[in-house]
Image: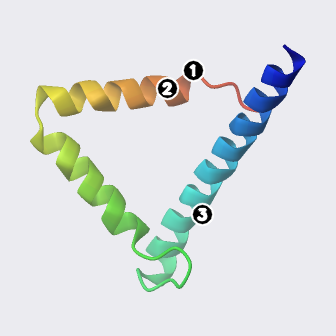
């Protein structure tokens, strides 16, 4: 059981790091432009993802709700 808790903490820390990097990439793309060497076209990818969810109507709305629910029920480290 201790191993599972350790694994959950490790995955939670990686997810939190990925979300921080995503936020950093968005801010840098807005300040500098989309020609960033490491982050690439983050804003374009996010806009395409949102457009894809929006074009799917109710299914996209349900998928977005599930994704938001997954992220909102996380405890921050």
Q: Label 2's element?
A: helix
* Horizontal side of residue 51 vs 4, given as left or right: left
Percent position of residue 36, x then y: 50, 83
Q: Of label 3 and label 1, which has the lower sequence position?
A: 3
**Which label is found at residue 53?**
none
Q: How many numbered callouts?
A: 3
> Residues at badges 3 and 2 in contact (C-beta under 8 Å)?
no
Which residue occupies 55% across, 57% down?
Answer: 22
Q: Is residue 64 above or below residue 35?
A: above
User: Going by the image, does 43 lie left or right of 32?
Assistant: left
- Tell me if residue 25 comes above or below residue 17 in the rendering: below
Q: Farthest top residue?
A: 1
Location of residue 16 in the rendering, given as x and y in whole percent from the top left corner = 67, 43
User: Which residue in the protein does label 3 denote?
Assistant: 24
Tell me the CA gap for discs 3 and 1: 22 Å
At x 49% / y 26%, what residue is drawn?
70
Query: Cβ–Cβ below 8 Å for labels 1 and 2?
Result: yes
Q: Which mark is residue 70?
A: 2
Residue to which mark 1 is pinned: 73
Q: Secondary structure at mark 1?
A: loop
Q: At which x and y percent is residue 11? A: 70, 37
Q: Residue at x 53, y 25 (%)?
A: 72
């Amino acid at each position: 059981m201790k191993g599972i808790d350790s694994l959950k903490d490790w995955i939670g820390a990686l997810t939190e790091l990925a979300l921080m990097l995503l936020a950093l990439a968005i801010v840098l793309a807005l300040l500098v432009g989309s020609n960033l060497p490491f982050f690439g076209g983050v804003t374009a990818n996010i806009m395409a993802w949102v457009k894809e969810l929006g074009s799917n109507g109710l299914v996209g709305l349900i998928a977005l709700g599930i994704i938001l629910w997954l992220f909102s029920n996380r405890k921050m480290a």
